[in-house]
Image: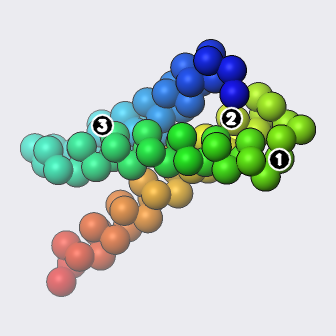
Amino acid sequence: MHPVDLFIIIGIACMVGFTPLIYVRHDLLLAFGYIVLSTVGAFAGAYVALWYFPQTDKPGIIFGGFAGAIIPVAVWHFVRRRGDRK
């Protein structure tokens, strides 16, 4: 992995993590969770994509980072929403 790829992954995590923050109102735990989950997910997704598909360098990092960042954030959003209805 090239050192500049870290900026790509961090940029993906910021895009995915800050988008739901537009709708968060006075819930610091939810805001922090979105940022942390998207960052960890983007790094994990990019690493797994490079591990399983080493021949795809940048596209693997981009698509793996997006998938890795979006999936945990969406799952956490729906799990929290389901818990609020009870």
**What x and y, as percent, mark residue 25?**
15, 44
Report the front residue among 1 and 75.
1
Estimate the spatial distance between the alpha carbons at disc 3 and disc 1, rounded to whole Å: 34 Å
Q: Is residue 75 visible?
A: yes
**What x and y, as percent, mark residue 32?**
24, 43
Vertical placement of 54 versus 70: above or below?
above
Few, some or many residues within 10 Å of mark 3 (<14, 14–19, 20+): few
Q: Earlier in the sequence, mark 2 or mark 3?
A: 3
Q: Is residue 9 left or right of residue 35?
A: right
Q: Is residue 10 left or right of residue 18?
A: right
User: What residue type is disc 3 on?
Assistant: Ile
Which image quarter holds the N terminus?
top right
User: Circle 1 — which element?
Assistant: loop
Residue drawn at (83%, 47%) of the image: 53
User: Circle 2 — which element?
Assistant: helix
Vertical placement of 22 versus 81: above or below?
above
Residue hosting label 3: 22
Residue hosting label 1: 53
Residue hosting label 2: 62
User: What residue type is disc 2 on?
Assistant: Ile
Residue drawn at (80%, 31%) of the image: 57
Q: Nearer the viewer, mark 2 or mark 3?
A: 2
- In this view, the residue farthest toward the bottom is 86
Asked whether disc 3 touches disc 1, contact meaning CB atoms under 8 Å apart, the reply is: no
Residue drawn at (61%, 18%) of the image: 3
